[in-house]
Image (cartoon, rainbow, N blue to C red):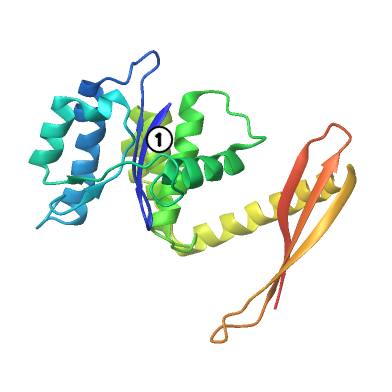
């Protein structure tokens, strides 16, 4: 299980809850709210969490004296929770449906695998950089190593990733994805195509072609098949 904090522009932080751990007021305060505090101390060194507003539901851990004192110390204003409002209950009407859409049909062998994939997705959402950026790739690798191979994080930091190395690797990955898609498409029982046209007048006109198919075992594949300029 994960505790996730997010704001209008995307995720703030996600906390992996240890197996068999009960979410108590103490855990919510000392582990979850502390991570939020660290995030904003790094993001806004001068103001930190001062002036922020938090919206969480009426679960008991959120309403303990310890949690309220922590929020007061962080100078965070607690908003009233409305369980039936799409705007004031964003977890029920936005976050959970989005996670279900992303995770539907996906299988994870363990918690670490799931956590590492979410962490990389979080980094990509926060820092939309090209995959030819070596430091960006290393940051993603380090985030995975911290969860799966914590003892090898330093080794990954020392890896040299030049622009040429990254470019060659991207070509290899592209060929691998293309070959995998061709193999899967040969087993499709039914398939459909979708087109998405660029509407940015200041950029190059292009059309993205997506393919979605299903095989005899009801395995669904959805990928971008081509990008036409």
The location of residue 18, given as percent across then percent down, is 36, 20
Rendered-image quadrant of the N terminus: top left
Compared with 22, 129 (above or below) is below
Q: Is residue 140 left or right of residue 157?
A: right
User: Which residue corresponds to the image point at 19% horizontal and 25% vertical from the top-left?
Assistant: 64
Q: Position of residue 192 (x, y in %)?
A: 83, 55
User: Residue tagged by mark 1?
Assistant: 145
Is 201 placed above or below 56 here? below
Residue drawn where x is 26% and y is 30% of the image: 62
Position of residue 39 measured from the top left corner of the image (x, y, whole percent): 23, 46
Q: Quadrant of the C terminus?
A: bottom right
Q: Is residue 195 left or right of residue 17?
A: right
Residue at (41, 44) in percent of width and height:
89
Label 1 CA crowd tier, 10 Å (few <14, some 14–19, many 20+): some
Q: Is residue 39 visible?
A: yes
**In front of the other: 23 or 123:** 23
């Amino acid at each position: 299980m994960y505790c996730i904090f997010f704001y209008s522009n995307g995720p703030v932080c996600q906390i992996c809850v240890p197996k068999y751990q009960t979410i108590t007021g103490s855990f919510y305060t000392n582990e979850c709210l502390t991570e939020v505090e660290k995030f904003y101390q790094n993001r806004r060194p001068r103001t930190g969490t001062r002036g922020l507003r938090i919206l969480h539901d009426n679960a008991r851990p959120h309403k303990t004296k310890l949690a309220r004192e922590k929020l007061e110390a962080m100078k965070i204003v607690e908003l009233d929770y409305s369980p039936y409002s799409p705007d004031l209950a964003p977890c029920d009407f936005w976050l959970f449906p989005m996670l279900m859409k992303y995770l539907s049909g996906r299988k994870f062998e363990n918690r670490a695998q799931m956590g590492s994939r979410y962490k990389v997705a979080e980094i990509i959402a926060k820092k939309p950089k090209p995959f030819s950026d070596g430091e960006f790739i290393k940051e993603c690798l380090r985030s995975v190593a911290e969860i799966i191979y914590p003892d090898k994080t330093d080794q990954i930091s020392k890896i040299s990733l030049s622009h040429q190395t990254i470019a060659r690797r991207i070509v290899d990955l592209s060929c691998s994805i293309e070959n995998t898609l061709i193999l899967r498409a040969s087993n499709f029982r039914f398939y459909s195509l979708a087109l998405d046209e660029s509407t940015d007048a200041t950029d190059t006109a292009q059309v993205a072609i997506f393919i979605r198919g299903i095989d005899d075992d009801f395995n669904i594949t959805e990928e971008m098949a081509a990008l036409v300029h």
